[in-house]
Amino acid sequence: MEQLGFEITESDRATQWRVKGALISGKIDGKLKAYKKERYQPMPIWEAKSMSGYQWDQIDSFNDLKKSPHHYTRNYAAQLQMYMYLEATPRGFLSLESKATGLLKILPAELDFGYVEEILQRVERLQGMLDAGVDPPPIPYDHGICGDCGFNHLCFPPRDAGEGFVPIEDTVLLEDLERRAALDPGRKEYDDLDKSVKERLKKLVGPGQTGMLGEFTAEIKEVGKHFKATAERDTTEIHVVIRRVGP
């Protein structure tokens, strides 16, 4: 952040706030004093976070954080907003680092009183249960939350997906599956187009020849195959090898 031109005052101690009968504690990463010698007044709250490369690619604004399907990512937004509210500061910044590349995004935020009020209402409900010594009701099963919870076996009613189903608790694998699903439509489009292109090239270029169109070449090869278990022992397949000539 300092290399980008920010001047930061970092915090080295936890702070406590009393709100709606609840005691909220936290440690603010710091406040931004200035950017390229231009002073902030008042100083915005600054929080630093990191996340996987796939998730990082999906976040382009502070609003994206608030709407993330991952609860721990949404918590980043809630944490910054609460610090802004508790410190009576209208602005904040979150620096978000990609664990895959080390690249940094700077996400500015304005204090959202409606969003903060929703958080405070939840705090107030939970504080009442804490004072009464009762457990809150279990939430509907959410792998992003329950999958990493050390007490998920105590929830009632227990989650039962039926005989033969095995719950998998691996958040990194879940991110990869989501990325795979996002890429799948493009794969089908590629396969359909690849098949169409090769069928047309077979009609335009003969075996042993190489066609050229723009920066692409297409080589037509006859490949013989021998099958021991069939009456027709030998067959010939036509393969199309497409290469890009340019860089």
Image (cartoon, rainbow, N blue to C red):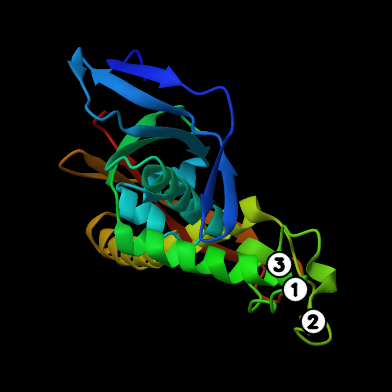
Q: Which residue is mark 2?
A: 156
Quadrant position of residue 174: bottom right
Residue depicted at 79% across the width and 81% down the height: 156
The Cα atoms of the two marked residues, 3 and 2, are separated by 22 Å
User: Of discs 3 and 2, which sits in the foreground?
Assistant: 3
User: Of discs 1 and 3, which sits in the foreground?
Assistant: 3
Q: Position of residue 182 (x, y in %)?
A: 43, 62
Q: Give yes or no for contact between labels 3 and 2 (Cβ–Cβ under 8 Å).
A: no
Q: Position of residue 200 (x, y in %)?
A: 26, 64
Residue 27 against residue 33 in the figure, above or below? below
Q: Position of residue 90 (x, y in %)?
A: 27, 43
The Cα atoms of the two marked residues, 1 and 3, are separated by 10 Å
Q: Which residue is mark 3?
A: 131
Residue depicted at 76% across the width and 80% down the height: 159
Which is more N-terminal, label 2 or label 3? Answer: 3
Q: Amino acid at mark 3?
A: Asp
Residue 70 visible? The answer is yes
User: Of discs 2 and 1, which sits in the foreground?
Assistant: 1
The Cα atoms of the two marked residues, 2 and 1, are separated by 11 Å
Q: Give yes or no for contact between labels 1 and 3 (Cβ–Cβ under 8 Å).
A: no
Q: Give yes or no for contact between labels 2 and 1 (Cβ–Cβ under 8 Å).
A: no
* Numbered label attached to residue 135: 1
User: Would residue 38 be found to the left or right of residue 30 on screen?
Assistant: left
Quarter of the figure with the N terminus = top left
